[in-house]
Image (spheres, rainbow, N blue to C red):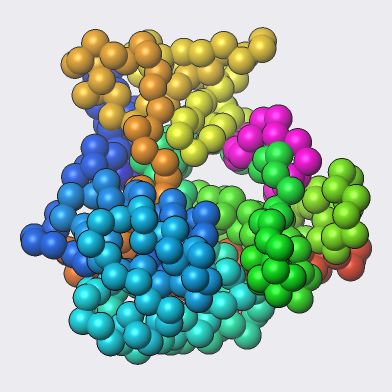
Amino acid sequence: MAELDRRSFLSQAAGGVAAIALVPSLNAFGAVRLDGELRVGVVGVGRQGRTLMGELGKIPGVIVSAVCDVDERRLSSGLRRVSGAEGYATVAEMLKSGRVDAVAVATPTHTHREVAEACFRSGKHVYLECPLAHTREDCFAISAAARDAGGVVAAGLQGRSNPVYQLARGFFRTDSVRDLVSMRAQNNRKTNWITPSNDPARREELNWRLDPARSNGLAGEWGTQQFDVFHWYTERYPVRVSGVGSVRHYRDDRRVDDTIACTLVFEDGAALQYGATIANSYGGAHEVFFGSNAAIKLAWSHGWMFKEADAPTQGWEVYANRQQFHNDEGITLIAGATKLAEQGKLKEGIGLPFPSEYYALLDWVNAIADKATPACTIDEAARATLVGIAANKAITTGKTVDIDLSGF
């Protein structure tokens, strides 16, 4: 969506404001700019890899032509989900096969460096899931290697390509929100983070998230995705973080906390409160920006704005769909509102038709078609990942940690 400046936002007629403010870029409507076919190989077909395979299959012109995984059972499972794809046990074999133009990497975080560097050297287009890596060293190595890559390289931080988030950012950067007061986010999902297996060695590999040597816990694995939303909106990064964590529910000798809370502080004193748990699902995943004129709540498929009683009326509110949240009335930020209004569907307040992974992949595919820079670069992903690493360190050590983003 084109950025909104204050003058154009306030000076348009009411109907024009609705059109400018509520219609994001063409990506929101699923426009695909490929000329011909794009053959994509998916590396790592666990839960996230299978999700990427499903979303890639929805994009016209994209063919999942190859599947790669070191785990034979997962490889077989992945192959059953796509027709005509070839299976490979190693990335090297897949890259040499001549069957792929692009690669989507969804292997465990601690394996990203080796896989990504091989894909970059091959000249293929690459989509790399996030967090980028599990160590600072690997973040820098992946970022350096990406600069020499021959193809279009995108990082899987999904907020930047999400039509609702693009739309809401336009509001955020006007007087609709005004002075940023505070920020809050959470990710609550009831899941034990355990993949069962009767084979001890395989069970250890599958459950790498519960190994402190290979995992940055909830702050790194989940927080990174959400931290980047705040970086993108504010165009700033936190400078220090403190936090706590513990095992509140899963008494199975795990060494990675199932519940965390942390505070990330920005240079001007603004604070982001973040919490996550795998022991409760209430509230799901969302981010909130509190401003002196309004608050914006984002929940990946939907977004809302809550206007303060003393905030000035700007005219476009009468065209917005409204929803009641306890004692507050929220204005639903609907991607493609003008198109929905023409169809008589604006009052339904529907969210995005596809999950956020779809829009991230679509943005990458269109960047390939246009020979353009994708919505999220590897360097931005590295910054968000380093914030996640620092947050996990603060939680596990109980100390305040300075966030060092020098070098990016």
Q: Quadrant of residue 215?
A: bottom right
Image location (x, y in percent) of residue 383:
57, 69
Above-or-below relation of 179 to 371: above
Foreground of the two, 316 or 201: 201
Q: Answer left or right for 394 relative to 184.
A: right
Image location (x, y in percent) of residue 280:
75, 36
Q: Residue at x 51, y 13 (%)?
A: 323
Q: Quadrant of the N terminus?
A: top left
Q: Residue at x 78, y 70 (%)?
A: 212
Above-or-below relation of 357 to 375: above
Q: Residue at x 39, y 22 (%)?
A: 350
Foreground of the two, 1 or 148: 148
Image location (x, y in percent) of residue 299:
54, 35
Q: Answer left or right for 18 relative to 279.
A: left
Q: Residue at x 57, y 27 (%)?
A: 294
Above-or-below relation of 161 to 253: above
Image location (x, y in percent) of residue 365:
25, 60
Above-or-below relation of 25 to 215: above
- Most extreme residue toward the front, as rendered? 198
Foreground of the two, 4 or 150: 150
> Magenta residues, as a range?
266-290
Q: Quadrant of residue 108?
A: bottom right
- The verdict on residue 36 being magenta is no
Asked if one can make out residue 84 in the rendered structure from this viewpoint, the answer is yes
- The verdict on residue 286 being magenta is yes
Asked if one can make out residue 227 in the rendered structure from this viewpoint, the answer is no
Foreground of the two, 112 or 187: 112
